[in-house]
Amino acid sequence: MRRRNVKQQEFLPENGAKFTCAQLGPTSSRVMISGDDQGVVSLWKVNHEDSLMSLSNATNEITSVSFAKNEEQAFGGTYGGTAMAWDLESQKCFATLKGHRSACITFAPFPSADQPILATGSTDTNVKIWDLRKKGCIATYKGHSLPVTVAEFSPDWQWIVTGGADGSVKIWELKTGKVLKEFSIDSTPISTLDFNPKHCGLAVGGHDRIVRYWDLQNFELAGQTQLDSTKIQQVKFASNGVNLFSASNDSLKVWDMDRSK
């Protein structure tokens, strides 16, 4: 008999708003941050009916939200291109970052909480690196021809990898700001990527319905999954570095990347 799914909890925006983005806490998986079309960023907790706090009343729609790795800070981006950073303990915005010319649609918090560095990607096709202490942009990476849809720092802090609606994946050296390597996927938008936590590898998924895995020691394609029925929305490695979860519009799959060639 097929197991029946039962809804355990539902979060609802206030004042007739519509959710535009959300993220689950990456460490505890017990908290969630959301943004809505009325410019409100809210924090929620599992098994708690009402929002814990509202962090923003921006004048523009919230287009992206994210937690820091330790869940002590949260970030929100607006349709107008502004990025905001909050300290969750004090519930105060400690940085308002302006520089993108249009919607801020992706965040990449630095892997170490000791380094106050944040990356943002925008529909203006640029990637910006911010120093949260100085509250300013320290680098702008230009190279995508369409919106930057996803970004992530490498575990060794040497690179940032970005994917775009132009179908390209770019590996940037943080020291030089130059593109070290670029992969192109048939001009289909990239929606998600994840570094292998155990090996020097990168999984990438997008609208072409395939997850590809690159060996970053030699920058060669090491494997790929079978064609999914719909576009790939999210990929995430298990802690063992072998199993990879991929979510499409209508399914969740677990892959053994050692056998995905």
Image (cartoon, helix red, strand yellow):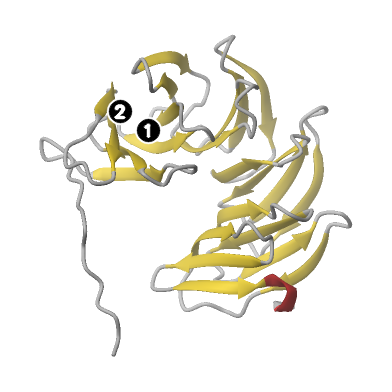
Which quadrant of the rendered structure holds the C terminus?
A: bottom right
Say which residue appears at 21% left-offset and 68% top-offset: 6
Expressed as whole percent of the image width and height from the top left, the position of residue 9 reads 21, 54
Say which residue appears at 27% left-offset and 29% top-offset: 39
Say which residue appears at 56% left-offset and 54% top-offset: 192
The foreground one among 153 and 80 is 153
| Residue 188 visible in image | no
Instruction: Say if 152 sits above or below 96 in the image.
Output: below
Asked whether disc 2 touches disc 1, contact meaning CB atoms under 8 Å apart, the reply is yes
- Specify the farthest residue to the right: 218
Quadrant of res 183: bottom right
Query: Which is more N-terminal, label 1 or label 2?
Result: 2
- Amino acid type indicated by mark 2: Asn
Which quadrant of the rendered structure holds the N terminus?
A: bottom left
Expressed as whole percent of the image width and height from the top left, the position of residue 20 reads 31, 44
Q: Which residue is mark 1?
A: 79
The foreground one among 257 and 57 is 257
Instruction: Say if 130 sits above or below 52 in the image.
Output: above
Left or right for 57, reference 86: left
